[in-house]
Image (cartoon, rainbow, N blue to C red):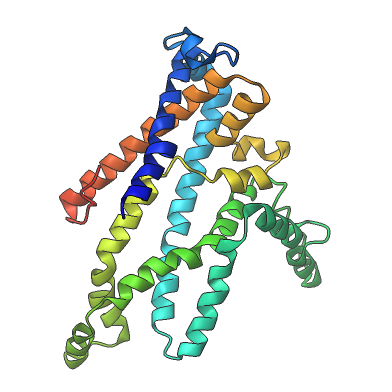
C-alpha cells in the first residue's frame, strides 16, 4: 500500500534533485546537464553580489513572517469557535462556507480580490466612500500591499487548515471536561486548561512545518496579484527565480537561488524540530 506513495516521492521529489548540479555549471540546453561545463561557485558569488537579491530575500522573510504571525493563529481560533457550536446544521454550514475558498485557484481568487479591492469599482472601496471615507489603494500602494497579501491568504486557507485542529479537538477525552466542570471550571478555564493542552502536540507539529516552509512566501498568490509598481515590497525569491530562470534563460543562476532557498528551509525545519523536542517534547522526531 505504501509503494505508490514511495514511487511518487522518488520519481517527482528525489530524482529531480540531480538537477541541482545546474547551480554549479554553466548550463546549456543544447549540451545538457552532463555536457555543460563546471562553474564552481561562480553563480553563488554573483548572486550574493546583486543588490536586487538582498531586497528579494528581505521581502521573502518579511512576507513569510507576516503570514506566520497572522495566518498561523487564525485556523486555531476558527477551530476553537466551531468546536463551541452546538447546532450540528449550523456548524456544518459554517464549515462549508469557510472551506470553499481553499478549492478555488489563486488565478480565480486573485480576480476576486482585485474586484473587491479595486480603488475605482471595488466593493470595499465603494463601501468606504459611501461611509464618507477616502478610497484605499490596497493593491497599488507599497504600504498596504503586503497586508492585502496576508489577509487574502488567511481568507483562502484558514478554513481548510482548521480541519486539522477540529480533528484533534474531536479526540479530546470528554471525561477531562467533566472533571474540570466538577472542579468548578467555566468554559474559558476549560478552554485554557483542557482544550489547548490537549491539541498542543498538533499545534506544535503544524508550527514546525510552517517554520520549515518559511522561505515559501506564496509564489502563486504573489505572481497573480503583484505588478511592477509593488516589486519593491512584493518580489520574493520564487518570483525572482521565475523571471531570471524562465524569462531571461539564466538557468544556472535560477538554480543557485533555488538551492540557496532549499538549504535555508532545511536548516529552519531541523532547528525548529530540535527546539520543539528539547523544550516541549512535541517534535516530529523525523528529520
Closer to the camera, 262 or 150?
262
Residue at the image point whose x is 51% and y is 38% from the top:
60
Task: Return the x and y of residue 223 as percentages of the image width and height.
Answer: 64, 42
Would you identify the image quadrant in which residue 183 lies?
bottom left
Q: Please say if 26 is above or below 189.
A: above
Q: Residue 151 in the image: x percent, y percent?
A: 57, 58
- Residue name at image x 36 percent, y 69 percent: 165
The N terminus sits in image quarter: bottom left
Left or right, 213 with reference to 151: left
Residue 83 in view of the camera: yes
Estimate the x, y position of residue 272 in percent, counting from the top left: 28, 45
On the picture, is 7 further left or further right than 101? left
Which residue is found at the position 37% from the left and 49% from the top?
4
**What is the tally of numbered marks visible in this picture?**
0
Q: Quadrant of the C terminus?
A: top left
Q: Quadrant of residue 239?
A: top right
Q: Nearer the viewer, residue 196 or 209?
A: 209
Q: Residue at x 20, y 89 (%)?
A: 178
Look at the picture and state if 88 lies above or below 24. below
Residue 228 screen position, x and y as percent: 72, 36
Residue 236 in sight: no
Amino acid at each position: 500500500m505504501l509503494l505508490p506513495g514511495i514511487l511518487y516521492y522518488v520519481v517527482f521529489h528525489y530524482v529531480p534533485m540531480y538537477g541541482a548540479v545546474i547551480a554549479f555549471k554553466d548550463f546549456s540546453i543544447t549540451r545538457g546537464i552532463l555536457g555543460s561545463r563546471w562553474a564552481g561557485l561562480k553563480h553563488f558569488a554573483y548572486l550574493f553580489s546583486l543588490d536586487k537579491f538582498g531586497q528579494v530575500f528581505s521581502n521573502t522573510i518579511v512576507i513569510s513572517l507576516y503570514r506566520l504571525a497572522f495566518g498561523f493563529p487564525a485556523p486555531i481560533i476558527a477551530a476553537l469557535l466551531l468546536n463551541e457550536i452546538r447546532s450540528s446544521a449550523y456548524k456544518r454550514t459554517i464549515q462549508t462556507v469557510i472551506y470553499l475558498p481553499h478549492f478555488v485557484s489563486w488565478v480565480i481568487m486573485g480576480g476576486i480580490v482585485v474586484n473587491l479591492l479595486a480603488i475605482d469599482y471595488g466593493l470595499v472601496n465603494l463601501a468606504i466612500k459611501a461611509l464618507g471615507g477616502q478610497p484605499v489603494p490596497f493593491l497599488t500602494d507599497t504600504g498596504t500591499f503586503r497586508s492585502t497579501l496576508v489577509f487574502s491568504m488567511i481568507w483562502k486557507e484558514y478554513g481548510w487548515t482548521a480541519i486539522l485542529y477540529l480533528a484533534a479537538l474531536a479526540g479530546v477525552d470528554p471525561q477531562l471536561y467533566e472533571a474540570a466542570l466538577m472542579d468548578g471550571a467555566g468554559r474559558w478555564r476549560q478552554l485554557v486548561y483542557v482544550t489547548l493542552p490537549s491539541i498542543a502536540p498538533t499545534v506544535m507539529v503544524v508550527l514546525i512545518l510552517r517554520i520549515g516552509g518559511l522561505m515559501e512566501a506564496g509564489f502563486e498568490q504573489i505572481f497573480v496579484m503583484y505588478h511592477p509598481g509593488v516589486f519593491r515590497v512584493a518580489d520574493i525569491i520564487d518570483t525572482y527565480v521565475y523571471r531570471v530562470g524562465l524569462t531571461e534563460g539564466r538557468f544556472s543562476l535560477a538554480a543557485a537561488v533555488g538551492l540557496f532557498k532549499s538549504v535555508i528551509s532545511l536548516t529552519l525545519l531541523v532547528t525548529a524540530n530540535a527546539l520543539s523536542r528539547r523544550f516541549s517534547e512535541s517534535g516530529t522526531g523525523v528529520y
